[in-house]
Each structure stands twice: as C-alpha cells, then as structure tokens.
Image: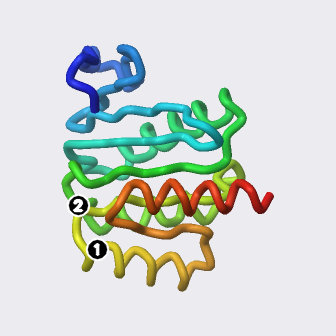
Amino acid sequence: MGANQEILTTVPDHPEPQRASRTYSLGKLRYDAQPGPGYLRVEFEGEIDSVELADDWLEHIEDVLSEHGLARILWDSRPAMPFPSDVRAHFWAWLESSSLVRASAVLMHSEMLRVSANLSAVSRKLVLKAFTEPDVAIAWLSGIESAS
C-alpha cells in the first residue's frame, strides 16, 4: 500500500470498513481495493482471524467488483498473515460460489505457498493461479481477459 495513503480505523462497534482513499481497515486487517484495467487489485496486510471478519471483507470486495463491473481479482497476500484453517476454507468456498469472480491471480510470498494454492485451485476447478511475481500474475490475468 502506498505510504501516502491515509488509513482510517474502524469505528468501535461498527462492522463496516471505513474508507480513506482506497484503503480500508476492518478489525486487524488493512486492505487496499484498487480497480485496475480489467481487474480489481486487492492488497491486504494484517490478520483475518475469524470467518465473520472474512465474510465482511469478502462482501465488501463483491460490492467493489459489482460497482466497477469487474470479474477478475489480483489478490496480493504477501504482507498478510496466513489465514487460519477455518478462514482459508471459507475463502475457498466463497471463491467457488461467487457469481462475480471469473478469475483470480494470487501473489504469495513463498514458492511453497504458491504451489499449495495452485494445487487447491486445480482440485476445486477454479480459474485461479498463484504467483510470486506481480508482472507474471498481471500478464496471466490479461491473457484471461483477452480470451473473453
């Protein structure tokens, strides 16, 4: 996330993310949702420690996708803490059931996580591929875009 962006925290007892530029805060999670050329770039850091928090986050991502007419996402998870197993299962289930997400590229901070994510995506028959290099991920999403 850009250093020049202001980050607002959530209001106590207020579950909705609070907007500051394109940077949001929700619990221990900070994320940036930037519409790009044909895809939404979601960069996140911090921690998603509950399925309820993940639900709020993913609902907001769906709202942004819908608002901008986008169906592809570049998830940049490199600065984030790994998801707990229940949150990870919820995230995969959301990807499988979302009518808005056509393709996802995921940036991972290690080769081991990249391989694991790709195996999970194949077993779930998702149009999702994990990468360690942003340029390669963007090129892949662009190829998916041009094939539509």
Report if the CB atoms under discs 1 and 2 are less than 8 Å apart.
Answer: yes
Q: Residues within 10 Å of mark 2 (few under 14, many from 20)?
A: some
Give the residue at x 37% y 26%: 15
The residue nearer to you, when weighing 106 against 48, is 106
Q: Nearer the viewer, mark 1 or mark 2?
A: 1
Q: Is residue 43 above or below residue 20?
A: below
Residue 61 appears left or right of 32: right
- Please state which amino acid type lies under the numbered disc 1: Leu
- In the rendered image, residue 45, in percent from the top left (x then y), is placed at 24, 43
Number of labels in the image equals 2
Residue placed under numbered mark 2 in the picture: 82
Quarter location, residue 24: top left
Q: Quick check: can you spot residue 8?
A: no
- Compared with 109, 9 (above or below) is above
Q: Position of residue 1 (x, y in %)?
A: 28, 32
Residue type at tag 2: Pro
